[in-house]
Image (tube, coloured by chain):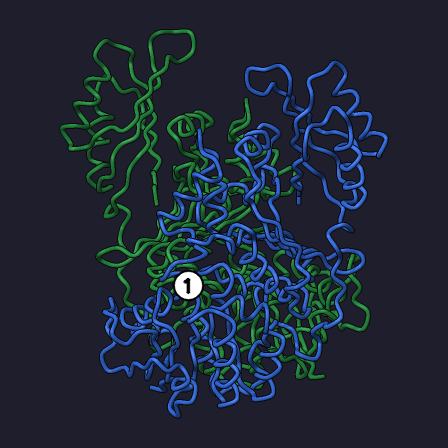
Chain colours: A green, B blue
């Protein structure tokens, strides 16, 4: 039976999961594939560390360059993360004629364009199913399953930590800070939660999904990114009362002028299935012009789930091993020459959107009339409006409202006028609404 | 640019959808594929019929055998349905060296084993993504995306008509008969709704999903099949009050002794995402030993959605056109020699399951105590119990209850004892519960 030789860089959560799959499920994989795998060498950070997984018969090294230049290795599996050393290693592996399987979303989002070109030049493949939404085969769905479609938009819960926090904040007496702390204690959030909470991790993944959906170059720098740290339990409660859940979504959308790529908290109607995706789970809705709306749901992280996606890539690669280069699915699902390197990405100000607003007003007679009139003067209409007293005092009231869909740039001008009113106290919190 | 020549059999809903995709989206498909398609010939039932789609430049024939023996045709796309003539045509096409793409679930479920063997013998491929769950690429997920996993179970809403009926029955004053009539008027249900309502269509699809999940031969004859025509609005209401939705599920499960394949109404906890899948939509949950639970959701029928899946198969086939035969994914995702032709399929009586019961009792003192005692004597415990008077009279009461998980064969014996009690009036309605 033909055997592919693997060199693995990184034996942490995902690397350990991959070894576990190879040790427990190889007979079932051989039933499917008619080929097998053997692991020749693994680069680890600390050779002396005790491990849960059996590495008998595998060379361990603390020099990852040994893996990429190992003459027996057919495929380098990059599971170390980061974008400096990892990029260098992947480039050297490609130049040495090795295929790459990686779970590294930052690497692909930031340097994918160059890496894909280099891989094409050296006639090797880069597979990266595990980089987005963990165990959910959503890259395969976009590149192959929905290939008959022009994708019109996609929207995903692609960061489990953020979704866990927003889900837990629905519980009584839970606020962002306390829930984040629990998430850190449970290991769902890092000690420095910035990447998850401020949407950077989601923006990496959205960059990849958007390029797959539209056949455009990776454009991480142009993704509008907004985190969830300003969302309050009040927002979630009010959104609920208006018929919405708040989800931290990555959204990629074809527009008249080009494309819009953005990550931000979003009110979504409770009637949509994605509104019911809770906890650390991920889900990606994809709307194609022929198929309509589909959704892909599952665990977005974790050892077994992520390693399942890495292994699926290895199986795909092994299956088509003897096929000509062009018979493999191209890196972004589009022929390299057809990938659009000049796609126009719209600024967030150019997008039409409905909005939810929350702010304090001085509780004077006629205040709601003045607010409504100010918005009406700017051609913005109010869909829902709710006001309630703040604390014991009658001095301030909390106002929440939702608007119709308007151009965001124009909306921000109206917001500035609103914030300038004597009635309004402090800043106005704004969350976008998507009905899909 | 390399062009594949298609011969299509059937120009109904799906055939028309396929032509529409080819006419509207071919440039985008060419961007992806670097190859193209042309339609040489289409077999239609009635040559004189006016059509919505443009067939300029395509030979139309009312003899489908012209398509399968046409010398220019590379791929025969079978979209006529049925299992007699369709089987004959597909066999002849295979023998003539044509690849097959089909949306015909009955054909695959009933005759797939023979057709796959014939295709292997003639070194052609049979692709059938459109046969299950319409536009959702769930066959691709099972064959490729989750290929690292041993699938432990899957459960799907794989008949949109049935799901529409159960969803509509939640509305006030809706009963099965009236909702079915509406579904027929809307075109969601056939004039003879047996295939959809009695679970036969779902059983065809489940047969296919199970073989893909477990690498076993297609076993339609051994699927336990139960329809939804005995479900009442009361059942749905009571299930809801106990924390469940009623869904018509196809379930395939690894058991200790082998496999269990069944289609039946099922109470599923409201906390599961599949409980929120409403209307004509389809969804398939798949649980793999490494990835955990994933779900695939989308439109299970309709022109564009089904044609999207057919076109995806054509793109896959075209992409790997120059690759050796073994580089393509095998028909059931497992190497032909590895497909288990002796899988033990368990009888429904052998399965452990929790149950919901609904029945009438004579409203005498102590009746609930006697019921509970009877079940307790059979080692069955009650989880939820609700009793309410029937109509104005105090003569009868309606009892609904749920039990713990027990062996179904043993449970049926207890049910016979219960039905023999003087207190119990008529038959007891039984619905299975799955917590997953």
A121 or A248: nearer the eye?
A248
Query: In the rendered image of this protein, does residue B292 appear above or below residue B130?
Result: above
User: What is the x, y in percent for residue B159?
Assistant: 50, 53
Q: Quadrant of residue B425?
A: top right
| Mark 1 closeness class: few <14, some 14–19, many ≥20 residues within 10 Å | many
Q: Can you name the residue that lies furthest to the right here?
A: B377
Quarter holding the C terminus of chain A is top left
User: What is the x, y in percent for residue B115?
Assistant: 58, 79
Quarter holding the N terminus of chain A is bottom right
Q: Chain of mark 1?
A: B
Query: In the rendered image of this protein, does residue A311 appear above or below residue A428?
Result: below
User: What is the x, y in percent for residue B118?
Assistant: 59, 84
Query: Which residue is tagged 1?
Result: B306
Q: Is residue A67 left or right of residue B141?
A: right
Q: Is residue B196 left or right of residue A72?
A: left
A364 or B64: nearer the eye?
B64
Q: Is residue B292 left or right of residue B304?
A: right
């Amino acid at each position: 039976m033909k055997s592919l030789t693997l060199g693995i860089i990184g034996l942490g959560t995902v690397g350990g999961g991959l070894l576990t799959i190879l040790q427990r499920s190889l007979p079932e994989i051989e039933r499917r594939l008619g080929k097998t795998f053997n692991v020749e060498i693994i680069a680890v950070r600390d050779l002396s560390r005790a491990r849960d997984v059996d590495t008998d018969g595998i060379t361990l090294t603390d020099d990852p360059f040994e893996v990429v230049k190992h003459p027996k290795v057919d495929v380098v599996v990059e599971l170390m993360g980061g974008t400096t050393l990892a990029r260098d290693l992947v480039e050297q592996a490609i130049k040495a004629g090795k295929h790459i399987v990686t779970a590294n979303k930052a690497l692909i989002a930031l340097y994918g364009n160059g890496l894909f070109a280099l891989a094409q030049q050296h006639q090797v493949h880069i597979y990266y199913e595990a980089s987005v939404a963990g165990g959910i085969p959503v890259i395969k769905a976009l590149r192959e399953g929905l290939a008959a479609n022009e994708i019109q938009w996609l929207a995903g819960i692609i960061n489990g930590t953020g979704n866990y926090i927003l889900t837990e904040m629905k519980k009584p007496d839970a606020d962002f800070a306390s829930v984040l702390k629990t998430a850190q204690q449970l290991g769902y959030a890092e000690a420095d939660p910035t990447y998850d909470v401020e949407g950077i991790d989601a923006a990496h993944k959205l960059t990849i999904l958007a390029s797959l959906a539209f056949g455009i170059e990776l454009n991480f720098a142009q993704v509008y990114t907004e985190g969830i740290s300003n969302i309050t339990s009040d927002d979630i409660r009010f959104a609920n009362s208006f018929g919405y859940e708040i989800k931290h979504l990555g959204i990629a959308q074809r527009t008249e002028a080009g494309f819009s790529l953005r990550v931000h908290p979003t009110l979504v109607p409770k009637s949509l299935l994605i509104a019911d995706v809770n906890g650390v789970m991920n889900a990606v809705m994809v709307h194609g012009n022929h198929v309509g709306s589909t959704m892909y749901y599952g665990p977005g992280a974790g050892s077994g789930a992520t390693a399942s996606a890495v292994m699926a890539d290895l199986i795909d690669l092994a299956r088509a091993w003897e096929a000509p280069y062009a018979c493999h699915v191209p890196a972004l699902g589009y022929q390299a020459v057809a990938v659009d390197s000049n796609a126009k990405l719209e600024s967030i100000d150019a997008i039409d959107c409905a909005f939810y607003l929350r702010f304090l007003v001085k509780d004077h007679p006629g205040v709601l009339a003045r607010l409504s009139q100010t918005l009406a003067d700017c051609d913005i209409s109010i869909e829902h409006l709710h006001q309630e007293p703040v604390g014991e005092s009658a001095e301030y009231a909390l106002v929440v409202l939702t608007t119709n869909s308007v151009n965001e740039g124009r909306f921000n001008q109206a917001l500035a006028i609103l914030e300038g009113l004597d009635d309004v106290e402090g800043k106005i919190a704004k969350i976008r609404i998507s009905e899909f």
